[in-house]
Image: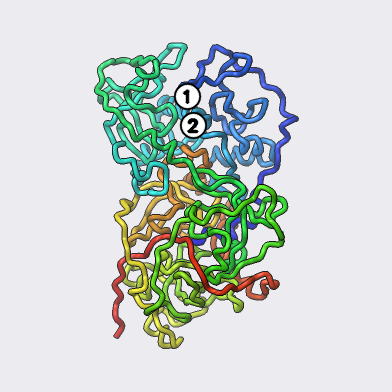
Amino acid sequence: MFDGYDSCSEDTSSSSSSEESEEEVAPLPSSLPIIKNNGQVYTYPDGKSGMATCEMCGMVGVRDAFYSKTKRFCSVSCSRSYSSNSKKASILARLQGKPPTKKAKVLQKQPLVAKLAAYAQYQATLQNQAKTKAGNRAVSMEGFSWGNYINSNSFIAAPVTCFKHAPMGTCWGDISENVRVEVPNTDCSLPTKVFWIAGIVKLAGYNALLRYEGFENDSGLDFWCNICGSDIHPVGWCAASGKPLVPPRSNNFFAREIHTCFLYFESMQYPFKPCMRVEVVDKRHLCRTRVAVVESVIGGRLRLVYEESEDRTDDFWCHMHSPLIHHIGWSRSIGHRFKRSDITKKQDGHFDTPPHLFAKVKEVDQSGEWFKEGMKLEAIDPLNLSTICVATIRKVLADGFLMIGIDGSEAADGSDWFCYHATSPSIFPVGFCEINMIELTPPRGYTKLPFKWFDYLRETGSIAAPVKLFNKDVPNHGFRVGMKLEAVDLMEPRLICVATVTRIIHRLLRIHFDGWEEEYDQWVDCESPDLYPVGWCQLTGYQLQPPASQSSRESQSASSKQKKKAKSQQYKGHKKMTTLQLKEELLDGEDYNFLQGASDQESNGSANFYIKQEP
């Protein structure tokens, strides 16, 4: 699915911070506990040890893991945000639980182990504060907490096994409720770090509600943590590592060892590396691809910078398994339109991504009955992902790829056509919406409503694409209506938001972004790499956008309502307007149509279809 081709037209880079102007911060008292992570003790070269608090977000963590010489910030993002003019506004917005804006930044975090250690301390602080504040809101004013959000509203999170592309998505089986692990004992006055046994009371994605062994039905010290965190260990780890096991109140426990908890380190090695070159969709001209370079990789998500971008701000975010990226030469091999780079030769250090790193598409047989130009179908509008529209096949490419246009809103030169594979989960046969009670968006300007396919095909002299050509595979995905997850806002693909599954049609999921109106919902395939388990952002160090609180939305002033209107234009009006403006533009001779040849890339099928016969 095309995740927001035009969504990154604004400058998404952060202004650089002046590290040299930072004042030195006096070291914290050495009496603070030393953090040990997998046997490593974080200390300064002069022997001092301690913790630090980020001056931007308030995160508490190991001082050695903090950013810059002065250790004032937990990450590059916080350092830059602190130095920007919007510091006060961003802090106020976060405290009020306001929705994200186009100015939200997502930057590379610090190394995984250090960040997880910092997050563990931060979460522990939030949990202790929450226990002493009765009647706290679901979303803490000091920061969003999945644990508080789920507990306060009795939500259910989608299990990790629903996300095959996520770390441990295929090997999560043994992790379940009642499993025991060894965790730090926070209910202890000893000066050194000690551990105790805890059992899993509830799972929510990667997050688990833990209860210390011996407390039975007493939930007074229950706490949420990321089960893949660096401080979570199988029973027996303390004995093997020489770490003390000290009970909070009781020393009676039943242990059951977990092995799979620690496979995630291996799972989080990604084949894509910075400086790799790929072909990716042009976010301003849907019909063509461009060369881009991998700038950074976070949890399998790629920040791609278009090769012609001199200041490296013209970027695009997607997952490494996205159907929008391909190996160099892909466009030429299938006959797809391509924008030739102004750069005549590769920059030093840049190299083409090996083709085998891209997910392969399902092979199809185009020799017999196949899609033809002019055939009608239904397709998810890539510029308004909450709608499924009347569409037409405009060109048949090699290896099962199709160029598709939305009826009633196409540019004369085809600059707003988009490419889907024949097995794509984003295209459907005529009648799919009607049989599944989904509202079908008719062509713009079509006045004969309610829309009837039988009449429209007769009026346009068109034929429907045969149902048998669509992929009808429906995997046992495990999603249920109401499940919580973390989802990419595909119209602003650098943002990952708190979201809910609100509808399921075979393999098609309706994703709602918590706190936003339904008009911003998006149709997404159940196997989309843009969906993640609860806790994925915390695990990888990616920034999670919290939901907009109901109270803050109701109390918004006229000015804030205007900002919300601007977001609406960003999703729907502005997206469409930007593309429609291309109707009067030619592509300046930069496009090249290649003869058809070989393939690459895509996601899976569509659903089981039963088409109602018209009289």
Q: Which residue is mark 1?
A: 37
Q: How is the image coloured?
A: rainbow
Q: Secondary structure at mark 1?
A: strand
Q: Which kind of residue does numbered mark 2 sit on?
A: Leu
Q: Is residue 570 visible?
A: no
Picture quadrant where residue 526 is located: bottom left
Q: Residues within 10 Å of mark 1 (few under 14, many from 20)?
A: some
Mark 2 lies on residue: 116
Residue 582 lies, with reference to residue 236, above or below; the image says below
Q: Position of residue 358 (x, y in %)?
A: 49, 55
Residue kind at label 1, given as amino acid type? Asn
Q: Are marks 1 and 2 in contact (CB under 8 Å)?
A: yes
Whether residue 614 is visible here, answered yes or no, is yes
Q: Residue at x 41, y 49 (%)?
A: 165
3D distance between C-alphas at marks 1 and 2? 10 Å
- Helix, strand or loop at mark 2: helix
Disc 2 crowd, CA 10 A, few/some/many (<14, 14-19, 20+) = many
* Picture coordinates of residue 95, whole percent (x, y): 55, 37
Position above or below: 257 against 467: above
Along the line of sight, the residue nearer the viewer: 296 or 140: 296
- For the C terminus, give its image quadrant: bottom left
Question: Residue 332 at x, y = what percent?
Answer: 57, 68
